[in-house]
Amino acid sequence: MTSNIHPTAIIDPAAQLGADVFIGAFCTVGPHAKIGDRVRLISHVVVEGHTTIGADTIVYPFACLGLRPQDLKYKDEPSMLEIGKNNQIREYATMHPGTEGGGMLTRVGDNGLFMINTHVAHDCKVGNNVIFSNCATLGGHVVVEDFVLIGGMSAVHQFTRIGAYAIIGGMSGVEKDVIPFGLVKGERAHLSGLNLIGLERRGFNREDVRALRSAYRMLFAHEGTLGERVEETAVQYKGQAQVARIIDFIRSASDRAICQPKADEEE
């Protein structure tokens, strides 16, 4: 099927366009862009740099993809931005390519919803089925795993990891890693329980939820160190797949701390 390109759009002849692409009024597409089948650029969209957009993704007006990263160390290296399939990228969203210091790649998975004015910075790795609410922003080198929801006007500090199925409350500043299934909130975000609504929506059974709640209480009790509690929880819940995700996440932590509950707050 042929593509539908508005006469005011500026498409570099070297750009690669898939089948049945729609490119609306006043869009610009650079020479190194690769646009997948049935992608729709509604209007006024900028796609520059070594940017790939997967099939069936829709990009709304004034989104800018693949422009120079906001990193003073960037020296025009030919780094990449890879965006997966079936994403919705709403108005004024921005996504930047990687840098030499981060592996030369920013990657966004499939089936994501990136609402108005969201930002994915250089060298981030974003999973599948995520939701970024309005004005949610990632600093550089952030890892966001599958099925994460980031609330509106939240900011995630560079090099932070957000585990699968976690939820970030609106207007939160996230400076520490967030465990899988965790719920964090606050101006300087703290852990505030598990994402129980998300677990229900994603079809987790009652046995998994009970195990996660019990393991959460054990992991974040007041006695002993976190390292000691992690090992005790791993023994007690050996073979429980969802608890193992949290244990593995904590064990694989970098130098960044893990978000923990406030002293007077329990799940």
Image: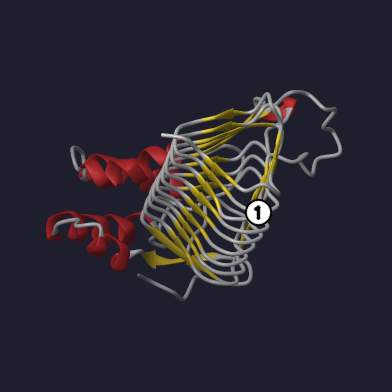
Residue 59 locus on image (x, y percent)? 55, 52
Q: Residues within 10 Å of mark 1 (few under 14, many from 20)?
A: some
- Residue at (64% x, 39% y) in the render: 141
Residue 27 locus on image (x, y percent)? 68, 48
216 left or right of 99 in image: left
- Residue at (49% x, 71% y) in the render: 263
Amino acid type of disc 1? Ala
Q: Quadrant of residue 34?
A: top right
49 left or right of 244 in image: right
- Residue at (62% x, 69% y) in the render: 153
Which residue lies under the disc numbered 1?
25
Residue 95 locus on image (x, y percent)? 64, 46
- Element type at marker 1? loop
106 left or right of 85 in image: right
Which quarter shows the N terminus? Answer: top left
- Residue at (63% x, 67% y) in the render: 188
- Number of labelled discs? 1
Q: Foreground residue, 56 or 43?
A: 43
Q: Quadrant of residue 173?
A: bottom right
Its colouring scheme is secondary structure
Height in image: 184 above or below 12? below
Q: In the current view of this chain or complex, which residue is farthest to the front?
A: 7
Q: Foreground residue, 157 or 113?
A: 113
